[in-house]
Amino acid sequence: MTTHTTRGTVRVAGHAYKPDGRFHFPAAQTPIRDERGELAGITNPREIIHIHSYGGEAVFFESLGRGRLPGSRCDNPLCVAHASVFLPFRIHCPDCLARCAVVDLTSIAQETARIHTFMITERTGAFNTLPTPIRFINVEFEGVCTILMSTLCVGEPAIGMRVMPVFNTEAPTYTILDLSWVPLGTPAGELPRYFHFGGTTP
Ligand SMILES: [Zn+2]
């Protein structure tokens, strides 16, 4: 019997999500008072568990935690963009809408990744978990027709700098935060906690 007192979890049965438990948790309001002690408002705490469906992108997030960087490729011979390779991962080709093939870009990234451009930000949005300042980098690869937005977690970025992918394989979150980049030549000992150079466990 379901008690609905536990934090919500989801399993899949019969190709459908089966949620169990609670997904929203209200907490007691607290008064906001002015300098004279008069009521000026309330806080209204709410905790919500979102369900984020990955669909055809699941293979991308699963692979990061295994130290692999997948992209996708249009294999439709009738497509004007036939054989185009995409990273960020695309489920479908934007030119012909055919389902793309999954391709392993780990080696291409390790051998050719460069910073196309970058920006450094000191202020972030809510729920940011990256240390500030965040060094956002746009990464380009040989043979890939798109540019990947990610972060540099060691050192300072420069346009044209060769970078290596690093992966959270020790405690994967199954989000884009399981991928980051370091300058080529960075020693393994300087990587952030849980992160490793990938490519060894296909
Ligand atoms: Zn196509």
Image (spheres, rainbow, N blue to C red):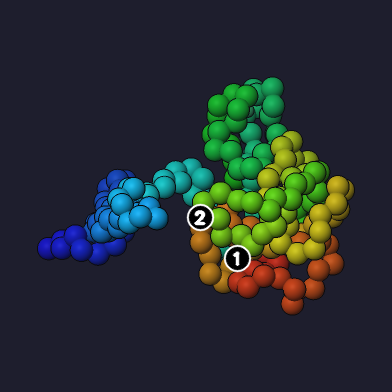
- Residue 122 percent location from the top left of the image: 68, 53
Residue type, numbered disc 2: Phe
- The quarter in which the C terminus is drawn is bottom right
Eye-nearest disc, 1 or 2: 2
Q: Earlier in the sequence, mark 1 or mark 2?
A: 2
Does 177 appear above or below 85? below
Does 95 appear above or below 174? above
Residue sitting at x 54%, y 38%: 91
- The quarter in which the N terminus is drawn is bottom left
- Residue 191 percent location from the top left of the image: 71, 71
The answer to whether any part of residue 152 appears in the image is yes
Q: Which residue is mark 2?
A: 127
10 Å crowding of disc 1: few (<14), some (14-19), many (20+): many
Residue type, numbered disc 1: Asn
SS under mark 2:
loop
Residue sitting at x 20%, y 63%: 5
Does 63 appear above or below 138? below
The answer to whether any part of residue 10 appears in the image is no
- Residue 129 percent location from the top left of the image: 56, 60
Q: Which residue is mark 1?
A: 168
Residue farthest along the bottom direction in this orientation: 189
Assign ligand 1 to one image quadrant.
top right
Residue 110 located left or right of residue 32: right
